[in-house]
Amino acid sequence: MPRFPFPLVPIAFLTAIFYLNFVSRIILGPFLPVIVNELGLGHGAAGSLFVFVQIGYASGLLGSGFVSWRLTHRRTITLSSVAMGVAMLVLSQARTLGEIHACLVLVGTGAGLYLPTGIATITELVDERHWGKALALHELAPNLGFITAPLLAEALFAVLSWRGVLGVVGSGAILLGGCFARWGQGGTRRGEALRLATVRQVVREPSLWVMAWLFGMGVGASLGVYTMIPLFLVSEIGFSRETANTVTGFSRVVSLAMILVAGWIADRLGDRRALALALTLTGAIVLGLGAFTGPLITPVLILFQSASAVLFFPPAFAAVSRLFPGTRRHLAISLSTTVGSTVGAGVVPSAIGHLADAVSFSAALVLIGIVAMASPLLLVVGGRGAGRTRARA
C-alpha cells in the first residue's frame, strides 16, 4: 500500500479503537473507592488489580507479532477489539476476587494485541517525515481516555452499577472492532512472530533495554499515577468520590492541546532531547504532588502532571521506530512496551498502594518522581543509540 503524507481518516479510526482499548484498561480506577469497600480490599490489593491487567497486556504484546504474522495487522486489530470487549462483558459478571483477576488478565491480553500492530499500521500508512504528528494524533486516544473515563464512570454510575459500566464499555469495543473489519484501512502487511534468532538480535541491543526502562517510567509517571489518583484524593486529601473523579477527569483536558505540542517538540528537538525533557519535567511534578498536598494545591499539581506526561509518548514511539528497521520494528515495539507497561502500569500502581498502606500516598509519589527524574541519565550512560535522532530544522 502506498504511503500518504497524512491520511487523517484512517488514523482517526485507529485512534478511536485505541481509545476504547485504553479506557477498558483504566476504567476500574474511578471505581476503586467503591471496589475497596465492596470487596474489603486494602490500598495495596486495590492497586494490584492493575498488575493482573498488565500480566495479560504483556502476554498480548508479546503474542501480537505471532498473531499479526498469521492474520495481518488489519485482522489483528479487529481481533484485539472484539476479544477485549468480550472479556469486559465477562468481567462485568465476575463475583469473586479470583474471577475478577482472571477476567482482568483476559482484558489485558485482548488489549495488548493492539499497540504494536496499530503503530506498525500507522507507520505503513504515513510518510516518515510525519510520523511524529501521526503518532501524536494517535496519542489523543489515551488522553481522551484520561479525561472521559472518570467522567463517564460517574455519569453511568448514576444509572448503572460499576459492573454495568464495564458491560457498556465492552459492548462498544465489540461494535468498533466490527466496524473496523468492514471499513478500516491499512494493516495489509504481516507482523513478525517471536523467532528465537530475531529475539536474540533485538535483546542484545542496549538501546532496547534503555527504551524499555524509559517506557516504564513514562507510563508509571502518567498512567501508573493516574490510576491511583482517585483513591489518593479520597483517602488522603479527603475528597468525595464524585469530586475526586471530576478533578481527575477535568485535569486531563489540557493534555489534548499538549499532545499536539508533543508531536511538534519530538519533530523539532529530536527524540533524545524530547524524551529527557518529558521525563525530567513529569518526575519533578509527581515529586511535588507527593511533597505538597492540600485541597487547593493538589488539583493544580494534578493538572500540571497531566500536561507534562503526554510529552513522553510521541518521541518514545518514534525513537523505537527509527532505531529498528521494518521487520524488527514490530518486535522492538512489542518488547519495549511489554517491559515498560508491566513496570509502569502494573508494578507502579501496586507499589503506590502498598507504600500507601505502609507509609502514605505522598511518600510513594515522591519516590516515583525521583526515579522518573533520574531515568534520562540512561540516555547518557547506557543508551548510545537510544533516541539519538537528528533534530529537524
Image: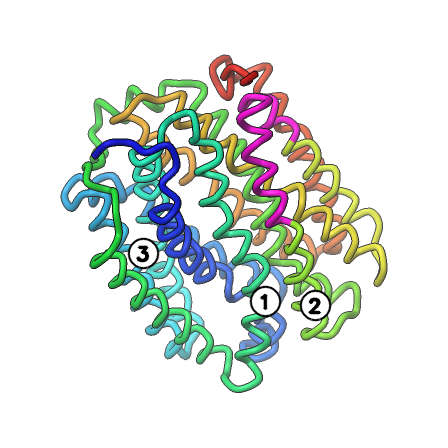
First-in-chain label (2 vs 1): 1
Q: Which mark is residue 216?
A: none
Real-space Cα separation, disc 1 to disc 3, in angstroms? 22 Å
Residues at discs 3 and 2 in contact (Cβ within 8 Å): no
Magenta stretch bounds: 255-277
Q: Which residue is mark 1?
A: 150
| Percent of width and height locating residue 272 | 56, 21
Classify 360 as above or below 308: below
Task: Give how far across and how far down residue 271 sits, in percent.
Answer: 53, 24
Q: Earlier in the sequence, mark 3 or mark 2?
A: 3
Tag 3 secondary structure: helix
- Relative to 203, does residue 114 appear above or below in the rendering? below
Q: CA distance from mark 2 to mark 1?
A: 9 Å
Along the line of sight, which residue is nearer the eye, 231 or 357? Answer: 231
Instruction: Work out which quarter of the rendered image holds the C terminus and state it.
Output: top right
Q: Which mark is residue 110?
A: 3
Instruction: Name which residue lies at 65% across and 35% down.
Output: 372
Element at label 2: helix
**Amino acid at dot 3:** Gly
The kind of residue on which mark 2 rests is: Ala
**Does 113 appear in magenta?**
no
Q: How dense is the environment of label 2, judged by Cα within 10 Å: few (below 14), some, or many (20 and up)?
A: many
Q: How many marks?
A: 3
Q: Residues within 10 Å of mark 3 (few under 14, many from 20)?
A: many
Residue 201 shows in the view: yes
Q: Nearer the viewer, residue 21 or 262?
A: 262
Q: Residues within 10 Å of mark 1 (few under 14, many from 20)?
A: many
Q: Quadrant of residue 191?
A: top left
Disc 2 target residue: 244
